[in-house]
Image (cartoon, helix red, strand yellow):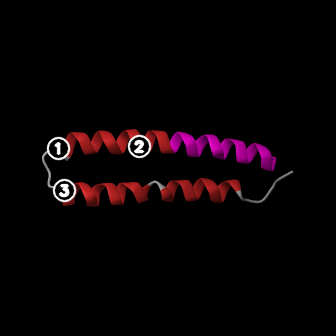
Amino acid sequence: MPAKLRSFIGTILIIGLVILYALVATTIASALLATSPWWVHFIYFLLSGLLWVLPAMLIIKWMAGPVRK
């Protein structure tokens, strides 16, 4: 797969991942954390704000992979 096509697909995947992840994370937060104290909100949003990086790193690693001709 050409490098430009791999970068284009990876960019679309990362944008989709971020949008979907944000929707899921805020839906879970509003459904489960409505009556929780502030520190529970803080921990949840800290962890969920960092967790999306793991699948994004896998996509970026795939994007930077060897170019096959």
Q: Nearer the viewer, residue 44 or 39?
A: 39
Query: Is 12 one of the magenta-colored residues?
Result: yes
Q: Amino acid at mark 2?
A: Ala
Dot 2 lies on which element? helix
Magenta span? 1-17
Q: Alpha carbon of mark 1 to alpha carbon of mark 3: how far?
A: 10 Å
Task: Tell whether 25 sits left or right of 53.
Answer: left
Query: Is 64 one of the magenta-colored residues?
Result: no
Q: Main secondary structure of the magenta part?
A: helix
Q: Amino acid at mark 3?
A: Trp
Figure check: 44 above or below 29 = below
Badge 3 is on which residue?
38
Q: Alpha carbon of mark 2 to alpha carbon of mark 1: how far?
A: 17 Å
Q: Nearer the viewer, residue 40 or 17?
A: 40
Query: Which numbered dot is residue 34?
Result: 1
Badge 2 is on which residue?
22
Figure check: 57 above or below 2 = below
Mark 3 nearby-residue class (10 Å; few <14, some 14–19, many ≥20): few
Q: Earlier in the sequence, mark 3 or mark 2?
A: 2
Farthest residue to the right: give it: 69
Q: Earlier in the sequence, mark 2 or mark 1?
A: 2
Residue at 35% across, 60% down: 47
Image coords of residue 4 (percent x, y): 79, 46
Task: Tell whether 50 sits left or right of 3.
Answer: left
Image coords of residue 21 (percent x, y): 43, 44
Mark 1 nearby-residue class (10 Å; few <14, some 14–19, many ≥20): few
Residue at 26% across, 58% down: 42
Image coords of residue 61 (percent x, y): 64, 59
Dot 3 lies on which element? helix
| Labels 3, 2: front one | 3
| Labels 1, 3: front one | 3
